[in-house]
Amino acid sequence: HRKLERVASNYTQQVADFLTSRGLHINENKSTVTLCTTNTHEYNDTITIRCNGKVLPNSKEPKILGVTLDQGLTFRKHAENTSIKARRAVNALRALSGVDWGQDKELITTTYKAIVRPIIEYAAPAWRPTISDTNMKKAACIERQALRAATGATLSTPAQHLYDETLIIPHERHTQMITTQFVASCTNTMHICHKSVIHPPDKRKSMRAGKDCLALHVLQPQNYKAGSHEPTLQHRVWS
């Protein structure tokens, strides 16, 4: 990782110098380094990146703007955190419902959209393209618990029946729709993410199995044409 460390340290120092010249300072104690790689044998490797002469601490699961990343970009920890938080909100929904008392189905469904769905779908365009089916099912399970509370259905009730009765789009499809809408909005040249999302990265910078890298993941519409309603999504990682 020596070449990687040298390049990253130089870049980090350039950023620090740029901020210092404008009266801003980086807090080295709160800054972390994460090695993202497809090689699981390198997960325990330590990367030495210096900023203002100090070595930045390594973190396997950094949390950035509410999204918990991991070294393989599987978002397993993020799915676990959101499931725990959403489960508490679902318990509040259950307190509003009952077999022969409580609020009606429509009100509880609306409450689910207001307090539970924003938790499990937060920052969906960041994690939806790469999250595994197993981790995706964790949030889908929470969603079905909320819909059972709204409809009074039992555990044996088919999931599709819950969605048909409440007119809720399933979690997998809804997050895919949000992500596609984000990519479509980035086709606007005035969008802040236009350059990083629409313009393809250098092919030499694509992530290959076993290659060490500090990763940045973006959404890349593939074969996008003007007027297309649903561009396909491709995940790119830059080294």
Image: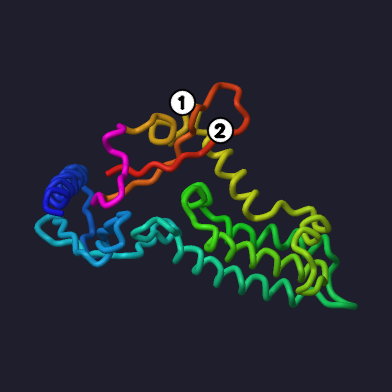
Q: Quadrant of residue 50?
A: bottom left
Q: Quadrant of the N terminus?
A: bottom left
User: 199 or 38, which is in the foreground?
Assistant: 38
User: 100 or 30, which is in the foreground?
Assistant: 100
Circle 2 residues within 10 Å: few <14, some 14–19, many ≥20: some
Residue 189: give its label: 1
Which SS does the magenta portion mostly show? loop
Residue 192 spot, x, y in % from top left: 43, 35
Q: Secondary structure at mark 1?
A: loop
Q: Quadrant of residue 115?
A: bottom right
Q: Residue at x 74, y 75 (%)?
A: 94
Q: Quadrant of residue 156?
A: bottom right
User: 205 or 115, which is in the foreground?
Assistant: 205
Residue that badge 2 annotates: 231
Is 100 drawn above or below residue 110 in the view shown?
below
Residue furthest out toward the front: 209
Q: Secondary structure at mark 2?
A: loop
- Identify residue type, mark 1: Thr
Task: Specify the segment rendered in magenta.
Answer: 202-212
